[in-house]
Amino acid sequence: MAQKTLTQDTKELSFKDFKAEVLNDYKIAKISRECSLLGRREVLTGKAKFGIFGDGKEVPQLALAKAFKKGDFRSGYYRDQTFMMAIGELTAQQFFAGLYAHTDIEIEPMSAGRQMGGHFATHSLNEDGSWKNLTEQYNSSSDISPTAGQMPRLLGLAQASKIYRNEKSVQNKTNFSKNGNEIAWGTIGNASTSEGLFFETINAAGVLQVPMVMSVWDDEYGISVHAKHQTTKESISEILKGFQRDNNANGYEIFVVNGWDYVKLIDTYNKAAKISREEHVPVLIHVKELTQPQGHSTSGSHERYKGKERLQWEKEHDCIAKMRKWILDFELETENGETLRFVDSEADLIILEKEAKKTVTTAKRNAWNAYNNELIGEVKIASSLLERVAKKSKNSAFITKLKNDLEKLVEPIRKDILIATRKTLRYIKDEEFSEKIELQNFIKKTIDAAAYKYSSYLYSESNHSALNISAKKPVYAQKQNLVDARIVMRDNFDAILKKHPEVVIFGEDAGFIGDVNQGLEGLQEKYGDIRISDTGIREATIIGQGIGLAMRGLRPIAEIQYLDYLLYALQIMSDDLATLHYRSFGKQKAPLIIRTRGHRLEGIWHAGSPMGGIINNVRGMHVLVPRNMTKAAGFYNTLLEGDEPALVVECLNGYRLKEELPINLAEFKTPIGYVETVKEGTDITVVSYGSTLRIVQETAIELQQVGINIEIIDAQSLLPFDLNSDCVKSLAKTNKLLVVDEDVPGGASAYILQEILEKQNGYQYLDSKPATLASKPHRPAYGTDGDYFSKPSAEDIFEKIYDIMHESNPEKFKSLY
């Protein structure tokens, strides 16, 4: 396999070294192209499910690789295979292992088969979940497929360098940065620049002035749609000219270069790197006149939407063909009259090209054998077991057929093995012999092994998991010190910033005014505008900042002003943050804490509680719903001791309520995944969370007056929920259940109900139908009455509980209506 491309300026090289570098680059490009060509055939023959390749983009990626240094980060998209090969982080065999979805992380290091080919990552973590020294390796953040989804994260990766260069408190973290000299390199297709995430990120990077170099690979199409339907003026660099920096204002440096011009590309990328690395200026490189020799993907042919003239132009302007011609035509006369050439004749290049093709053919064969032989071995074990089972069973003929059908498969998968063995189990359900037990154990073992291969690492499995952090209660002074709850939050954040120098907090209005509810009051003045900072109104890239910063060893707390506004950022939370640890097979992490406030207030856009939608979109994150600010502060303290991302939803109407101020700030911890029984009772278990829990507590007093004693459980944590199964223990006592929240019907309350009844088997203790009480199926209308008639009120809760008790004992609890 070709080695990493050299990074020195060609002026510093001897001609011999320059020649070696050029030919090595050409070989890498040819290997990459052969991978694309052969990869497509593997998909069309059925050995792989889908292919999306980097053919046509090879030469500019060679240039990018030359400017890319250890410690730098890539946040790209699924056509960057040549770049990954050029920096030495992807071999041809690994390329095919990814195409076949090999589930061994040593063989397929990008994702252990969890992502389709073309999605690249490097390993940031050691086996124990601790950080590697990221400055000593080339770094690629794990790719995602959603177009432009790589952009928000790119912003944070770049901003980390700015923080490490300018914030003294973290300049000792030399395993993450060397004086902020690292660049974050982004890549994107020209059509995807139409996405809002692209523009939001470009604007934010210009405002922040971070070392980000953005490459746009422009082949004039987005799948089948021409650039004239994608971009104003058909040119992203044209419409971004207003971002060009000048003597009067900061902005971007913008370059435009043809994607087939090897020399100009190298010069452009070296210039871009120097500007961005030294000056911390963002750079846009618009790489034009690229091609797609095989079209967009294996799902179709570009001949359907490209005319003959365009196809002929692409053939002539293929970047590898252009580089080949340049190599053949190159001559340099020395002062001594000697003529220097890269090759003596075309035959030299043909030999190199044949070597590249052989390398790829061999890599493909080895990758397939490694993948298929593993499965064939598993088939042999299953087949042998089925044969022995068949000899003992009265249904031998049926089982033998399943065995024979399994053995006939040339390209088996694990699904085939389990279909045969699980169907066999049905045939012997009424029989007893030792081979049946062996078969049962084989099936269980195979499913358990598959759980590791396909379902592990959704959350941290290291000792750093937030679930391993024990509870630590708040400690209070002898003399009670009641304060507005926001003071608890503010003073705890103050203590956090002192204790954890790597913590940075940012969001809309978070800096100068100390957030809209004054939970950060005065902290920017105390800690500076790097650690406590304002952002623009751009929720998606606020989350992206947090992801990138967290991937580079900082501990960001990203504030989204209101819970309703979280919807702007939900895609990035769901597609990127929540899946990162899983899709990288536990090799990358981003322990970002997202802070927001929500639940009851006034009106459609400030009183939503879309918790059901959130928890079903962000599996892979913790979702925490504290009832007061002390509990919330405890969650922040816990999360900062762990290594997982989380969302904390503070109660919007709780900042001015009185709470006692703890004296062990930044030390007390609210445990994650555990409920709290805030009132014991005997008649019915009521589970709630957040602002609604306080209403339940108030209603409990009124219910007591009519002889109903409710047990109140605060969920506290929705993801995960009640790891200790305390809810079902309560049901065993009360035999009745009501879940109350202010999400829409079928939202988080339905989720809690399923957790208690199905996961905890709480159904067996019920003597009344379990119930939920949620909001109306719409956003709340404006005003106090809008809240009263849209969300559960004290009267609603009272009457719901009373009705359940009436059904159970109509003589004692007469009907209210």
Image (cartoon, rainbow, N blue to C red):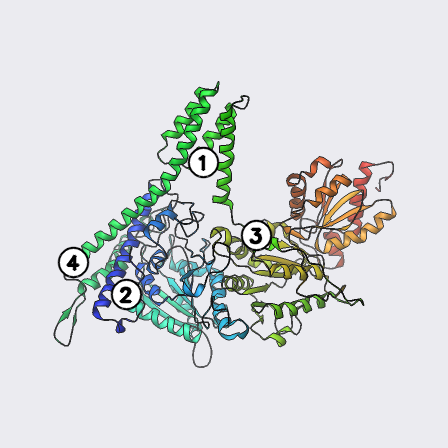
Q: Residue at x 76, y 35 (%)?
A: 767
User: Crowdedness of circle 4 by 10 Å Cα count: few (<14), some, many (20+)?
Assistant: few
For the residue pair 520 and 215, the one nearer the viewer reads as 520
Left or right: where 168 falls relative to 25: right
Q: Callout 3 environment at 10 Å: few (<14), some (14 to 19), or many (20+)?
A: many
* Dot 1 crowding, Cα within 10 Å, few <14, some 14–19, many 20+: few
Q: Nearer the viewer, residue 342 or 610?
A: 342
Q: Secondary structure at mark 2?
A: helix
Q: Is residue 532 visible?
A: yes
Residue at 21% of width from left, 51% of height from top? Answer: 354
> How far across and down, in percent of the image, does residue 449 sit?
48, 40
Q: Viewer-proximal residue, 614 or 337?
A: 337
The reply to whether discs 2 and 4 touch (Cβ–Cβ < 8 Å) is no
Give the labeled residue for mark 1.
415
Q: CA distance from mark 2 to mark 4?
A: 19 Å
Q: Quarter of the image holding residue 400?
A: top left
Amino acid carrying mark 4 in the image? Glu
SS at mark 1 in the image: helix
Q: Quadrant of the C terminus?
A: top right
Q: Gap in Å between the C-alphas at discs 3 and 2? A: 43 Å
In the picture of the structure, the residue carrying the numbered disc 2 is 262
Helix, strand or loop under label 4: helix
What amino acid type is highlighted by mark number 3? Val
Kindly identify which residue carries mark 4. 346
Please tell me whether residue 297 is drawn above or below residue 421 in the rendered image.
Answer: below
Is there a contact, CB below 8 Å, between mark 4 and mark 3?
Answer: no
Taking the image as drawn, is residue 507 in sight? no
Give how far across and how far down residue 143 sits, in percent: 44, 55
Q: Are marks 2 and 1 in contact (CB under 8 Å)?
A: no
- Residue holding disc 3: 618
